[in-house]
Amino acid sequence: MGDGSGWVTEDEMIEVDRVMVDDLGIELIQMMENAGRALAELAVALHAPASVVVCAGSGGNGGGGMVAARHLANRGVAVSVALTRTDLVGVAAHQLSILDRMGVAIVDDPIEPELWIDAGIGYSLRGAPRGRSAVLIERMNSSDAPVLSLDLPSGIDATTGAVPGLAVDAAATLTLAAPKTGMRGSPHVGQLFVADISVPPGVFDTLGHPAPTFGPREA
């Protein structure tokens, strides 16, 4: 059960996702659309960037980042996507196919943008980031441009805040549905915002948490 603070662990967030899909029939792709639209809107509100590179993973977090890329492209932003892997399946592959049809660039070696979007690992971190994920984290951290992370900065354990290897140093983080316990007090999070992805308040009641408040939060 939760501690009543509104901060959730990885296991609790997995249960929230399960209830949304299995019990309520709210599909992952619907939550992903809400997440990506909110991310694009926050990127514009905070930075009004002319150019954005979205670093996207192969799971739901990456799918949300690709939705954001679509919405940013629709607003006239010069957006490109750098993938942590190319063998995507399911909803992430679906989002990639949309970007391909729109002509959004998928790049191996991104050019320095005005804003990076970190939509890499999310709450599914298992050990230190490796391979392409590690390369993109290093690229973002070495840049002069700010980073906006989706859900939590890539490389941070969602429950404990442990950093087993590289982690993104975000200027801001848009976490989804509720803030994750591992982000509390983390120097990697930056300014923290909470996005509404349409989770009914009663879902949080079952975890012993109050329904979250949306918008900026203290990390």
Image (cartoon, grey):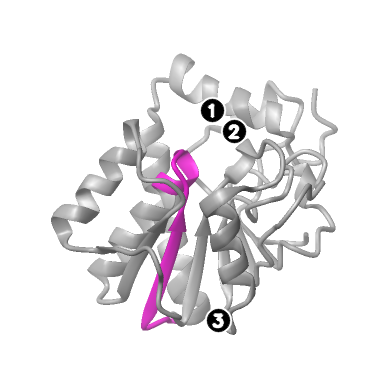
Is 146 on the left or on the right of 11, as rendered?
left
Tell me if mark 1 has few (under 14), some (14-19) or many (20+) residues whose alpha carbon lies within 10 angstroms of its own.
some
Amino acid at circle 3: Ala
Q: Do the numbered discs 3 and 1 sit on residues whose CB atoms are within 8 Å?
A: no
In the image, residue 177 above or below residue 215: above
Residue 19 position in % (x across, y down): 53, 20
Q: Residue at x 63, y 76 (%)?
A: 142
Q: Which labelled disc corresponds to residue 111? A: none
Residue at numbered disc 3: 145
Residue at numbered disc 2: 201
Amino acid at circle 2: Pro
Q: Residue at x 62, y 66 (%)?
A: 138
In the image, residue 81 above or below residue 7: below
Is residue 37 among the parts visible in the rendering?
no
Residue 26 position in % (x across, y down): 40, 27
Q: Specify whether residue 56 is painted magenta.
A: yes
Residue at numbered disc 1: 17
Quarter of the image with the N terminus is top right
Figure disc tally: 3
Is 116 on the left or on the right of 81, as rendered?
right
Residue nearer the viewer, 87 or 211 = 87
Is residue 50 among the parts visible in the rendering?
yes
- Which circle's residue, 1 or 2, is located before the other in the chain? 1
